[in-house]
Image (tube, coloured by chain):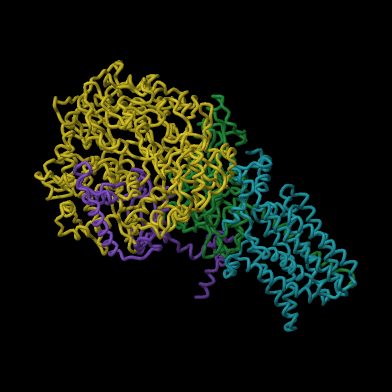
Amino acid sequence: MGIRRWIASWPVYRQLTGSDPLGRGAAAKSRGSRELSPRTHDADRVVRSICPYCAVGCGQQVYVSNGKVSQIEGDPDSPISRGRLCPKGAASKQLVTSPSRQQRVLYRKPYGTEWEELPLERAMEMIADRVIETRGRTWQEHDARGRRVNRTLGIASLGGATLDNEENYLMKKLYTALGAVQVENQARI
Amino acid sequence: MSSVYRLSGLLADPAGEAGYRDDHPERVGFFTDTSVCIGCKACEVACKEWNLVPEQGLDLLGQSYDNTGALGADSWRHVAFIEQRVPDPSVTSSGTDLGMPGIGAPEQPAAAEEGSGMRWLMSSDVCKHCTHAACLDVCPTGSLFRTEFGTVVVQEDICNGCGYCIPACPYGVIGQREGDGRAWKCTLCYDRLGDGLEPACAKACPTDSIQFGDLDELRERADRRLAELHQDGVGEARLYGRDPDDGVGGDGAFFLLLDEPEVYGLPPDPVVTTRDLPAMWKHAAAAAASVAATVVLSFLGRRR
Amino acid sequence: MSVPRKEAMSEPARTPDGPIEADGIRSYYGRPILKEPVWKVPDVPSYLFLGGLAGASASMASVAELTGHRELVRVGRLAAAGGALASVGALIHDLGRPARFLNMLRVFKPTSPLSVGSWILAPFSGLTSASAGAQLTGVLPAAGRLAGGAAGLLGPAMCTYTAVLLSDTAVPSWHEAYPELPFLFGGSALNSAAGAALVGARPCATRPAIRMGLLGSGLELAASSRMERRLGVVGEPYQRGRAGALLTAARALTVAGAVLSVIGRRSRAASAIAGVAYLAAGACTRFGVFRAGVNSARDPRYVVAPQRDRLRGRGGG
Amino acid sequence: MAECHPVGFQWVIEARNRGAKVIHVDPRFTRTSAMANEYVPLRAGTDIAFLGGLINYVLSNEKDFREYLIAYTNAPAILREEFADTEDLDGLFSGFDPETLSYDPETWAYEGAEAAPAAGRRSDIVGDSPPEHSGPDQYGSGGATIGAKPKVDPSLRHPRCVYQVLKRHFSRYTPELVEEVCGVPPEHFRRVAEAITENSGRERTTAFCYSVGWTQHTVGVQYIRTASILQALLGNIGRPGGGILALRGHASIQGSTDIPTLYNILPGYIPMPLAEHELDLDQFVQEDAGQTGFWGNMRAYLVSMLKAWWGAAAAEDNDFCFDYLPRLTGDHGTYQTVLNQISGECKGYFLVGENPAVGSANAKLQRLGMSNLDWLVVRDLQMIESATFWKDGPEIESGELRTEEIGTEVFFLPAAAHTEKEGAFTNTQRLLQWHHKAVEPPGEARSDLWFFYHLGRVIQRKLEGSSEPRDRPLRELVWDYPCEGEIREPSAEAVLAEINGRGPDGPLSMYTQLADDGSTSCGCWIYCGVYADGHNHAANRQPGSEQSWVAPGWAWAWPDNRRILYNRASADPAGRPWSERKRYIWWSDEQRRWVGADKPDFEPTKAPDYTPEPGAKAQDALAGDNPFIMQTDGRAWLFAPAGLLDGPLPTHYEPHESPVANPLYGQGQNPTRQVFDRKYNRYNPPDGVFPYVFTTYRLTEHHTAGGMSRDLPYLSELQPEFFCEVSPELATERELEHLGWATIVSARTAIEARVLVTDRIRPLRMRGRTVHQVGLPYHWGPNGLSTGDAANELLSVVLDPNVHIQEAKAATCDIVPGRRPRGESLQRYVDSYRRRAGIPEEADR
């Protein structure tokens, strides 16, 4: 049985007994080819997304396998993009799975020459302290001409335009409550 | 070779000829309409993302915006960029001389968009999935094989890197991957086809320059498009690889070009090398017979 | 990896004008249309040479066996086995995945000269090894004779299938040469085998080998001159550069070997030198032909010009 | 468009295949040009002359869409006698004050109508130096308000009616002038003019697409104005296939303007209040409350926003916490901020997915600012140049800065990618599209939502016991979003619900439901309805193939899911489609409402014959044939009687740095542009030292400053390094070799690039002289896989006065073969250029 199967799996045998005597097709098909299936086939889920590059807003389908992004493709349902993507959109998987992506908080001391690692929690506390301190130190109740301004010019922000609306909303809301007015983004540039 | 197993010429059903049963799927392919290619290279990236093709290195080639250079083991799609000067009616009419020498296409594209003074041809090249595929024919291991879709695919679990397919390809498509040793090229996304998906490049192509489908249907579509362009005065438009009677029996991936094929780096009249294989074997047999005869002859006559 | 590509750019492709027009031939920045063979040097030219040597030697040995030229049997068997094994080694070494060399026997493809060649080479190397083994050890002499005889029958095919191997490619200078190349390789194989005999046998035993060398040289020179006359443009790579030099050397060595084999036939040293000349000629022929093909693949002119001519001949575009 | 928005370009190809003519106007021949029927190269920075030429062509050949023009634009309005045009004043409009380099717009008003400053502009302007106060971005999306209905002459014959004024103003913009300024031959220009006018009118429409090639100029706003005038004249606004389409370059750059991280506006284009002695909510809104059009409801929009922010603390008796809003005193834009960093006023900086060390004009200025901070927080996916400037920036290499002497404390926080968080991007056509979360962010990477929510939470905790009045806005801030999962990610949908707004009965569905009495809350009034019925409409995904071509079932457009703005203009004044071919929204007599494939950008049941009662307010004051509902008069403005700082009409000014003089006027440049001539920001004088024009741009293969592309192998290999593009003629003139190196110099610095010699860049002939242009893609910097000098190093900071956007698209330079000097010799090299050009040296460096 074993030997017979072994011989039967020899393509030459298939050449001699099958419909592909020249061994250019059916007889030459390998086990890998017979078992081939696209990796999207076994994805755990397909998540609908939007391309993060330009503002055309192409639809994307994000395939997830084992908690990892395994493929990103255009969403054919999108009336904007009809499933198509440009080179950047097509490189989205590389963008989100890039090995050079930073995954740890890094900290550079004043006058320091190298990065140091810093736990995220600690960084959040330190940044909050800096914000409160700088705000207090640079707070303007009134400007030089006595007009009420209620603000700080000591803190500024420049945001990209790849942020979600909800993120921009929280930023603007928090900054405004902080009295920080120098809040800007790519739209000015 | 028997007439059933043809090595060249018309062949209606390459998958059937390769031993697949009559219920095998229709032959599929690409029609790449370069008249709407915007050279974005989405095809190159989408292909690499799907097929996990390695990066091929950073190298500014200075060939217009083409930094890929050619098809190969690590570039299964390659967008060619060709800058050409063409007459500029607005310049001649205002009598200004831009000092443009008269180089450019020998048959000057009549309908090159007037006024531009130049045109920029872009074309996404890919494996042609020939009806008579030399790479497949010469492959000694059966790694390269004809799929049930009529396409030509390297089986990576088989290839032993003998390299024979590489000089056999009349288009210079297939290449050997450094550090891996095996031969690689476009699979027409064989794995996706099995799942009813279209190849990654065709799916991504923003302007539908790369069209995927049943080959017969694509050929009709291409004929219509060609007629349309000719009607619009784009006389230099031509189909390349569409003719099932050409030297490779027609390409599974064919093109609408706006200049001579060689301008895009394509051979003007490729012929599958195995077309001549029967003749080659005959010559080799004759030569072998000559060798045998010579040996025998040398031992005739005086012993010393 | 970027270095060679950068250097390639210092060729005429550097002009920013897009398609290059040289000699009326247009191209894509002067880039090759074909991929040049990735076959390694010296692996593959050696494989071509050694295969030819082995094939002709095996045939020589078996005819010698029949005609009682014992010394030539010995030299032939050893050269055949040595050549065959070395040629197998060279072939495996050239593979991108040497561990998978057995895949060569996974299918039998008449459309693939390398498949056919593998199916010839595999038994041939086995048979020649067996016969050489018998020769060396004196064990099972009958089996050795049988193996040698069988190898002798395969020998001529060994000499010429490698020509088909090269011709069955898109490489212009190889493909277009398919009518002559088997004769060129066959002739060269004959004088290589003769060369081995001249080196390995005493002058008193080499007379058939000398004749074989002369006939082989004649065949080789005739084939090569016919080839170069017929090929036209794609024949150029056989005449130019290193390839041209190698082939010229091959011809000179062949002639020298032939002449010396005759006039020095009584001298062991002269015969050996003639033999070496023959062997060197065989190697030069394979290396030269190999390199000429590679050069023809590199230059888009050799691809485009004949195809354009063909199209013109058909009255097409 | 093919270059930077390839997937959007599929529709252009589709249109071309159906017979549309595609015209591409650009200094360089791009992938778009390759697909165009007509490519028009022109000198960078001269589009107003080109578009002005088209306007002149339309007017002098009476090619305008007359019915549309009379009914829907302010062409018939009559101007005051005191108005004087640039044609009369050699390049200045009436009202210019040479002392302050600013205009008093009083004389630009309609006759009989007082120009009134708009909301947020009541502060006395005179106090600050004029180039530094806020411009028309103060007016939100509605433009400036005007006080009363103007006198009109529907026959358009009155010499002071807008139509006639326009005609005179543009009469010198002849094809010959276009050639002289732009380098476009008259024959070529005429073909474009004919194509555009033949393709406009009842049966056909023409669309304009633009990008930052129009905005990044010292006259950027006026570029758009010029196109608006042309499109309004041709009747191409509010109609299918028409419009002026901004092709924005970032996934949610529209969203970041709608819900602005911009200093001068609040969500929904409500202006930030300016500093004033006695400013309360009523006063702030006063100017608008009595006004006509939808801005008449601004109090409701603002009060609802204040309720969303300060909840119960915001009440009638405390002006709904209006006082919690900080006040502006001038330009607080990003470039001013950087100058404040250098001067030491600004001490802490957040960079959130932005890389100014490469992406902003005069990148050195940015780095000098950052190296003078107390602390800097950088949030990004990759290690961008703005995070590492202290270590390996160009100033470290040149010896201008030393790492050990930079006191900036730097926090780098890894960000989550779009697949690792959920939220909405607003695309270039105002579509809010939700992206769902696919996977968890890796390691310590977090979304910006997470970062700002938790930062706010920590700050609130730390200030818990504070009695400082300044801390009340923080302590009372509504900041309680539900969190999910192990990393405590705040719910983006909860934030969206707040943005959408709530009333007593739950989620609101339309901004007309907003009240000014505190009974509704709404974070951004124009987004009201995105969460109608508690359903996330941004996540709507009805397949395009299963609905009409307008595709209202896919995502959600602001406002109210309307896909074409001002679409009332797609019907004639009587409400009938202008033509069957171009029908879109029309009045149905049977249904007594507007019908069509889209939602009407109009009150759905306001009949075409509606005439407002005298004294009517807000939208009620607009007639049934006033399509431009955000304007106070409901009309498209050919002439802007108020709202712009640099003139009521566009006119050609040379870029700040230009090798040629303005052929139109003695006034060469925009007189009100913002100039910052100081150390590290010197300008190139118009002499021979910097003889060439350069322009910056993007390539398909990369994304802006490269943070999302230069680290990706598949993109980097496609465009592996920085290069410059020059014509063969310039290459000969300067001995530049294809693929060799070139050094490009401005008064700021010198950079090096590989050279691509290409016919795609063409020398332009104008007035007997040749202008050479150098093309510079600006994606590169020293970090990442694909590297090179940053083109933005070369640019100066000089701004449009209205919106403070830098002139990045036209400047001057010199170009020479070879690589640039390194280390200290680079400074000496640039100094030698400055010396030759007569610019003060940076002596005290």
Classify A103 as above or below B7.
below
Q: Position of residue B296 (x, y in %)?
A: 82, 67
Q: Position of residue D203 (x, y in %)?
A: 35, 26
Chain with colour green in the figure:
B
- Tell me the shade of chain A: purple
Give the quadrant of residue C280.
bottom right
Chain with colour yellow in the figure:
D
* Front residue of D410 and C233: D410
Q: Name the side, left or right, on which D788 lies relative to C162.
A: left
Give the quadrant of residue B236.
top right
Question: How many labels, in total?
Answer: 0
Q: Position of residue A166 (x, y in %)?
A: 26, 50
Going 49% across and 29% down the picture, which residue do you hit? Answer: D183
Q: Quadrant of the N terminus of chain D?
A: top left
* Front residue of B8 and D562: D562
Chain with colour cyan in the figure:
C
The answer to whether any part of residue D295 appears in the image is: yes
* Front residue of C278 and B215: C278
Going 69% across and 66% down the picture, which residue do you hit? Answer: C47
Q: Position of residue D575 (x, y in %)?
A: 24, 26
Q: Name the side, left or right, on which A115 lies relative to D838.
A: left
Classify C29 as above or below B167.
above
